[in-house]
Amino acid sequence: MSVRLPRYRTGTAVSGDESVEFRPFERHDGPVPTKAVATLGTQQSVTAGTYDARGRLFSPDVTCSGYTRVVFSMYKEGNTSDIDRRRFIKSTAAIGAAGLFAGCVGSDPDEPGDGSGTFRIATSDEVETFDPRMNQMAWYSTAAHYLFDSLLMMEPDGSGTVPHLADGELEEVDETTFVADIRDDVSFHNGDQLTAEDVAYSLNWVRNPDNDSPNLSNVEFLDEAEATGEFEVTLHLEYQSALMERTLAGMNAAIVPMDAAEEMGQEEFAQNPIGSGPFELANHDPSATVELTANDDYFLGEPALDGLEYRIIPETEVGYVELATGDIHQSGVTEALLDEAQNDDNIDVYQLDNFDFQGFLLNCLDGPFEDRRAREALQYLVDYDELLIGAVGDLGSRNWGHMPQGVIDAWDFPADEWEEQYYPEQDHDRAVELFEEAGLGTDFDVEITSQSGEATTGRATVLQNEFEEVGINATVSEISDGEWLDGLDNGDFDITTYGWGGNDDPDGYYYHMFRDIENDDGGMSDDVVGHSSIGYLYEGARERGDEEALEDLERLDEIVRAARQTTDREERYEYYVEAADLLMPLYPVLGVYSAESATGVHTNVQDYEPSPFGEQEAFNQWQEARIDD
Amino acid sequence: MGLLRYALRRFVQIIPVLFGIVTLMFVMMHALPGDPVRLYLGTEPGQELADDLIESYGFDRPLHEQYFDYLVRLGQGDLGQSFVYNRPVSDLIWERMEPTLVVMGLSYLVALPMAIGLGIYGAARHNEAGDHASRFAGLAGISTPNFWLALMLIYVVTYHLELLPASGYTSPFIDPIESLTLLIMPVITLATAQTALLMRMTRSSMIEELRADYIETARAYGIPERKVLIRHSFRNALLPLVTIVGLQVSTLLGGSVIVEEIFAIPGLGRLFFDSLIDQDYSVAVGVTLFFSTLFLIGVVLTDIAYAYIDPRIKYD
């Protein structure tokens, strides 16, 4: 029998006298091999999967290039070695994944991670607050997972959540009531045991408007968390939420120790955080370093690493130099340095989806693009691929239906149909025709406002050139973030660069970008025109009395709200397909690309693979990083 | 007037200047387009939260009220609260003062002796090969943008030669050796332009002095050339040099913003830069006030030094 690598190659499994077949996306209930080796020759690329102890594929589409050999290494559950279940799962996944991703031979599974050292990571921004309840910074949202735990945790491929502090799956009492059992073997860094009271307190704290948490809107589905036992929490929801599990796996729902947090107060807690994570804060030199040391008493076991050190290096290029010289172990890689990093034998480069939307916002209320035909003309005016290259080069991919490719793939949205219908080939003649139909001709001026930054000015300049090629006078104005936000609020723009960081769920795009804010309960006040992320599409239709568009928009608003209040994935799928079909013919935005970030990891880091979902990547139930200097 | 009274008078004169600077900075920061709450909360803030923040930081009050309130608190030694960090500005300045002052101080320590030495050498070897070389070096030093020099140093010294770390800061009071290795490139970056400028200043002052009649007289008396250069000529050439040294404090402070950003030094320059980006009013005004105070103290000390260097100048 054999280990079958999905879609491409068949390898050989060796398991004493036994071997077993693995298939993607299928749970494997049979015996788990003590060791499975797949030798794959010298093909240039392969798609393969790695499996956890239960035979579940958790990394279904891993592509590696230029490898010579790939080793899957698995331990048999309950074997006679001194490896416990946790280490077994981690080693299995990590070794397999590391071997595949790095395009090289994996570690010897017989020598479980006994490495140590401090893993040094470059980051460009300093920490403003260590309190995850108040944090808004993207990198600390990832780093906070090392200090704090949450009820659930995202799987490394983002396909779902698994229980973390919760002792098993959440029990659904009814649509708006869930019960979570809490592990009774978890302690905070100060030695206090983590109980249901801490969980309830943490969730309710963010939910309480009096605490001014900027993350409140992410937990609005929660009415109250109630400690219904020493280790049992009941979640009472305002409404059924499709995003509940994801939220409970994130740092908006980080669990903090109630007594310590209350005693310290928010300001002090923000500087001296106490969590229950695999690392604890050892030292914080403002704007220089954040040092974490391993938590010996972590409920999943002691991490192999002695610690983590975040070095705050504002310039990515400088961080890369430190990585290349081996002074740090992980750094971002700019587009300009990408080739060099990929050719450096000491650096493994990972391109991770940022899960965002990048494009242009068109003013649908006022100016040349209030007419739908003028907005449609833009689709013919531009060469999307050229815009993508002009903005980020290789660090991005086209987006479809205003969602990144990762979301399209995960949900199997009909991107091909959308491409055919709404993303036409560049055709300047057709663009001019549409401008003329809209009563504009080519004798008008367009101002493209752009936030500063290579990616924004790059794509704005490409767009400017396209306008000028058909004889339309276009200017690019680079403005500060403050001016840009002012412009969004008062509608003072024709076309402006726009970016939105969503997540891997369509809701992150459709609800936040395309709902009618006027229908929000306690939403924006009247004096903030504000939510112009849809380019005043609703306001424009209302002002022109465009009944047909209004009808579509009313439905659009209705379904993007409904889609987040059901957990039925098929129902949600239908909602989003309908929403896209309503939205795209109105062309409120020009969706150009979704960005990727490149990160380089020094090859002396073992059993570590960065993930766009970034939860305790250096130490979790799947992998355990160590430094092998 | 005695030195003490003169110094006191000059320091008192600083106060209205600082008042003017604070006023200007306060108005300029508030005149910037954009709303710090929107910048902090992003494109889709919850209105309730936005309102709470606006109210708690007083951004909803008329500008003149905010200004007078700020002045009253400033008079009590309170620089305000950072909107971004939610911490007192004075704490932030205190924490980040050391790296900036250390880098600046070391830059002076490197730049001054080098500049004086090369300046005197150039003057003594006027129009000879050594003078041409030092002039060329000076010109290159002045013409080289410090951000470019910083990046080139990192590229050559760290990336290719792997001699020094590219970034970071360790206090010299904690680990002097590590601190030194981390500070070499930032200090070279900051000191290069200073050295070049001061060297050219020293050289031209010295050349002028060396042409003076009293120097000819001294030489005619047979005083050794070294003594003529150092004791007679240099002392008189010091006056313009001291003026420039005092004024260069502002250049160094400006340079520190770039140097700290590139070499990842957690100093006031970076704090100031970030506060402008985030429109963190209190921090921007507080750091400006701190920088201005340093600069003005430098100017006053320069004035005091004049009289010490040239006894003809009286404190009146």
Image (cartoon, rainbow, N blue to C red):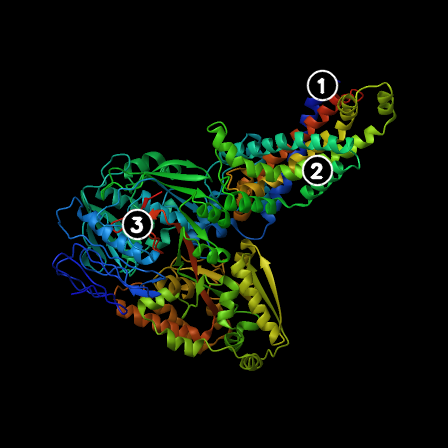
Amino acid type of disc 1? Leu
Numbered disc 3: secondary structure:
loop
The answer, for residue B68, to whether it is visible in the render is no
Q: Which of the numbered marks, if any, corresponds to residue B3?
A: 1
How far, Cα to Cα, is label 2 from label 1?
30 Å
Which residue is tagged 2? Answer: B197
Amino acid type of disc 2? Leu
The answer, for residue B224, to whether it is visible in the render is yes
* Same-chain check, marks 1 and 3: no
Q: Position of residue B263 (x, y in %)?
A: 52, 42
Amino acid type of disc 3? Asp
Q: Which of the numbered marks, if any, corresponds to residue A607?
A: 3
Provide the chain ID for the residue under circle 2.
Answer: B
- In the figure, residue B26 lies in which quadrant? top right
Residue reaching furthest to the top:
B2
Q: How many badges with numbers are in the image? A: 3
